[in-house]
Image (cartoon, rainbow, N blue to C red):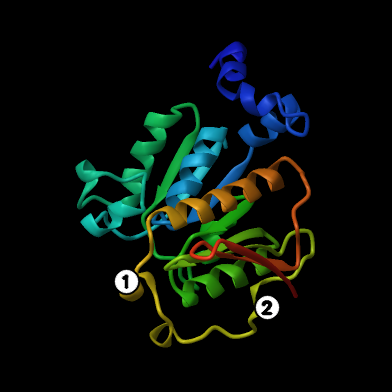
């Protein structure tokens, strides 16, 4: 892409004083791994691709199902039954063919987590279970990777940045994970489709701020209640 085309595509970001050309170069040169191509991963993928993140990897082992489509906006009726990472790759190619999207059709495990996460500057966790969240967190701590964290249920969501420049991580907030069997999830209690769009967009924004060296709030978690429209920040 010619320089003038790059400027045209990203001009509304470049016009922001805190971003500018230098910030856009950082975005283009960045490498981000997104865990999960579902409700949270979809808006993260959408907005990081639109922003021009140069290397965007997506790790997910599921396939697109009909019940996904109320909230997983990068997928559609034509991608039903195919791997979510393949659907994500196609979405990114259609949105911004200048960036490299890498689909990793694998479940994150203790044996492969380090290998999968090592090449990337930032990890964005959009997984939907506590065992994966803690595994991703612990691997990021081991690798000294910044982790952008989010979760959703019903009308509520959470967003935090962990392990960034020596900041605290998930285990400093919740030392041990609860049992997945004992915790409610979207499969049993549901989620309103726009909620992951809100939380995922906040996660994408945090990632872009980190990439461009803008300040982010650390050692705190933001709780979002969209039913009563309340936002609360808890420090830890």
Decide which of 138, 47 is in the foreground and name it: 47
**Secondary structure under badge 1?**
helix
Disc on the earlier residue, 1 or 2: 2
**Secondary structure under badge 2?**
helix
CA gap between label 1 and label 2 equals 25 Å
Residue found at x 37% / y 30% = 94
The quadrant where residue 9 appears? top right
Number of numbered markers: 2
Residue found at x 72% / y 40% = 212
Residue found at x 65% / y 43% = 208
Image depth: mark 1 or mark 2 in front: 1
- Mark linked to residue 141: none
Relative horizontal placement of residue 213, taking residue 182 as reference (left or right): right
- Mark linked to residue 173: 2
Where is mark 1, residue-wise?
A: 187
Binning the other alpha carbons within 10 Å of mark 2 as few (below 14), some (14 to 19) or many (20 upward) gives some
């Amino acid at each position: 892409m010619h320089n003038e085309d790059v400027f045209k595509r990203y001009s509304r970001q470049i016009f922001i004083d805190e971003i500018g050309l230098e910030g856009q170069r950082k975005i283009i040169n960045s490498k981000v791994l997104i865990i999960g191509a579902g409700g949270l991963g979809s808006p993260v993928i959408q907005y990081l691709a639109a922003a021009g993140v140069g290397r965007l990897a997506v790790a997910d082992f599921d396939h697109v199902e009909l019940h996904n489509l109320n909230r997983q906006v990068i997928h559609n009726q034509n991608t039903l039954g195919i791997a979510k990472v393949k659907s994500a790759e196609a979405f990114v190619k259609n949105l911004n063919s200048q960036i490299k999207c890498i689909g990793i059709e694998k479940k994150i495990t203790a044996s492969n987590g380090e290998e999968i996460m090592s090449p990337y500057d930032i990890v964005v966790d959009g997984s939907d279970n506590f065992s994966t969240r803690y595994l991703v967190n612990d691997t990021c701590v081991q690798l000294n990777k910044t982790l952008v964290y989010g979760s959703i249920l019903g009308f509520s969501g959470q967003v935090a940045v962990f392990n960034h420049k020596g900041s605290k991580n998930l285990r400093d907030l919740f030392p041990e994970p609860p049992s997945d069997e004992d915790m409610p999830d979207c499969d049993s209690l549901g989620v309103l489709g726009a909620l992951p769009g809100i939380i995922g967009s906040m996660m994408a924004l945090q990632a872009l701020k980190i990439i461009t060296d803008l300040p982010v709030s650390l050692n705190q978690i933001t709780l979002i209640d969209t039913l009563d429209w309340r936002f609360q920040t808890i420090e830890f």
